[in-house]
Image (cartoon, helix red, strand yellow):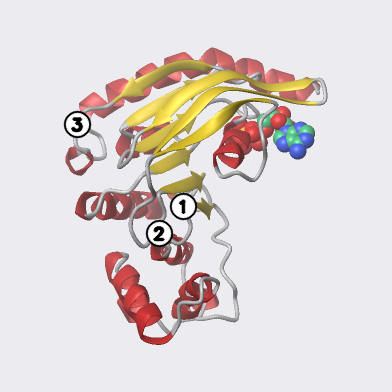
Amino acid sequence: MDILLDGISHSYDDFEVMRNITLKIPDGKIVCIVGPSGCGKSTLLRFIGGLERPSSGSVLQIGEPPEGCLNPLTYIFQDFALLPWRTVSGNISLVLEDHGIRRAKAQSIIDDVLERTNLSDFANALPKQLSGGMKQRVAIARALAVNPAVMLMDEPLSALDSQTRELLMDDLVGLWTRQPFTAVYVTHNLAEAVRLGHSIVVLSRRPGQIREVVHINKPLAERHFGDPDLDKTQKHLWQLMRDEARAADAELLNA
Ligand SMILES: Nc1ncnc2c1ncn2[C@@H]1O[C@H](COP(=O)(O)OP(=O)(O)OP(=O)(O)O)[C@@H](O)[C@H]1O
């Protein structure tokens, strides 16, 4: 299923947040969204997820969700959002219970997503026993369990230290390579964007408008830490963003 954002503009009363965003999220691709603080990245994600409606323009779903999809648009947040009293398995089974899926069918889905996220040995652990990186793996496994059409990822790695972020990026690349998924991935981190994005949308400061969409053709599995091509793209992204980020920073300070 593709998602098309068609001419999205939004204001909160007379506070204009974004202007005329038109963008396609193609099936099976990861689209990263970067831009200075306050340019409307999370707001755009809420529009795609249907949690809020834009003042004008529309979010169109083109085509059918994948077979067995329980929840077409599924969020992954930076704070993991796990229930502390439920085990890893229990946290995943919760989203299946919501859809009336229990017992053997639920167990086979849980086993599959735990295996795909290398969590099989931690099925009975409680969140408090897990590191931040492991908790985020559980959140990813939980999202995969509903076989979403599109994963909406809002700064999913930003609560983690840099080594753990590297490991999780490798995991996401491995997951995508084994079974491509569609994602909109909001991040402040340009290194994440060039490692994970098939395309990277650079927004201007508020009101957020698309400044440029950068496409990266190198397969995800061939992108590595310190890759000179990626470094070049990252520098280009930073050049696009630097002045906007500085202006946005000053704007927030003066608000
Ligand atoms: N419900 C709301 N009511 C009023 N203003 C809002 C609301 N939600 C967001 N905003 C404002 O809209 C602007 C865009 O917010 P948003 O959180 O989407 O930006 P962002 O690009 O994700 O920011 P950051 O990178 O800092 O997370 C901000 O100025 C924010 O204060």
Q: What numbered label is drawn on residue 69?
A: 2
Tell me the kind of residue under disc 3: Lys
Q: What quarter of the picture does the N terminus occupy?
A: top left
SS at circle 3 = loop
SS at circle 1 = loop
Place of residue 211 in the rendered image (x, y in percent of width and height, measured from the top left): 48, 14
SS at circle 2 = loop
CB atoms at circles 2 and 1 under 8 Å apart? yes
Tell which residue pokes out farthest to the front in this image: 63
Q: What numbered label is drawn on residue 218?
A: 3
Seen at 32% across and 48% down, the residue is 181
Tell me the kind of residue under disc 1: Pro
Place of residue 27 in the rendered image (x, y in percent of width and height, measured from the top left): 33, 40
Determine if residue 119 is in view. no
Is ligand 1 closer than 8 angstroms to the Cβ of mark 3?
A: no
Tell me the kind of residue under disc 2: Cys
Seen at 44% across and 49% down, the residue is 151
Earlier-in-chain disc, 1 versus 3: 1
Q: What quarter of the picture does the C terminus occupy?
A: top right
Seen at 47% across and 66% down, the residue is 135
Disc 2 crowd, CA 10 A, few/some/many (<14, 14-19, 20+): some
Residue with the mark numbered 1: 72
Place of residue 148 in the rendered image (x, y in percent of width and height, measured from the top left): 41, 54
Q: Quadrant of ligand 1?
A: top right
Q: Nearer the viewer, residue 31 or 164?
A: 31
